[in-house]
Image (tube, rainbow, N blue to C red):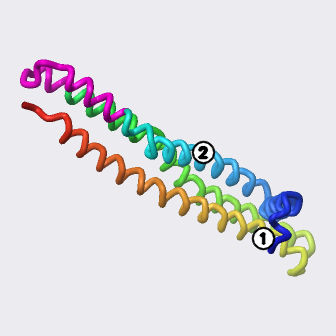
Amino acid sequence: MFALLNPANAFNAIVDFLGAGGNVLFAIMIVTFFMWALIIERLMYWSGAHAGVAKQAQRAWGARNDHKSWYAHAVRDKLISETIQEASRFNNVIRALVAVTPLLGLLGTVTGMVQVFDVMAVTGSSNARLMAEGISRATIPTMAGLVASLSGLIFINAFDNNVAKASHQISDELLIE
């Protein structure tokens, strides 16, 4: 257990894991890193920057003298829209990456099974040792794709809830007199 805390051992374990899963697992890793970079960016936004964006919209609305005309309503709608647009930035990209990772896992399943069938065709028998590599290339990417997808799904749902709450809150704060 403590051996994996050694960076060299951890790196070797990751390389072995990627080797057992094949090229598709490498693609899943890249997509997952990109997805998590966007998730971390959104976490940083919600932990601090959103309050500043909402305050800026409130200051712009408060600086207006006219809150009753049609034009004032249009400005209010614009401020609300800009705030919600900033709050939901990258949500669709994260959602797409959440959808892509299990599909990449399925691609890994198919390529691993093709390798198993290729071994069976070449050797003419069902040699378990030769088929084991293909089986691992079939199951490991599937597992990795599903785990990556589930981890992203948890955060995209939280971000969508935050956007809905922010939408209601900013609409309430920019009152029409």
| Label 1 sits on residue | 136
**Residue lying at 53% horizontally and 54% vertically, measured from the top left:** 98
40 or 105: nearer the eye? 40
Please give the label number shown on residue 37. Answer: 2
User: Residue drawn at (37%, 39%), measured in percent from left and top?
Assistant: 51
Q: Are marks 1 and 2 in contact (CB under 8 Å)?
A: no
Q: Amino acid at mark 2?
A: Ala
Q: Quadrant of residue 102?
A: bottom right
Task: Provide the major secondary structure of the magenta segment.
Answer: helix
Is 130 located above or below residue 106 in the figure? below
Residues 161 and 51: in front is: 51
Is residue 66 visible in this depiction of the protein? yes
Quadrant housing residue 56: top left
Q: Find residue 79 and report its image quarter.
A: top left
Specify the quadrant that holds the N terminus: bottom right
Residue 50 drawn above or below residue 74:
below
The answer to whether residue 117 shows anywhere in this view is no
Horizontal side, residue 25 vs residue 132: left or right: left
Q: Position of residue 31 (x, y in %)?
A: 64, 48
SS class, disc 2? helix
Q: Residue drawn 38% across and 51% down?
A: 160
User: Label 1, label 2: how many angstroms apart (C-alpha)?
Assistant: 28 Å
Membership of 64 in magenta stretch: yes
x%, y% of residue 167?
A: 27, 43
Range of magenta residues: 53-75
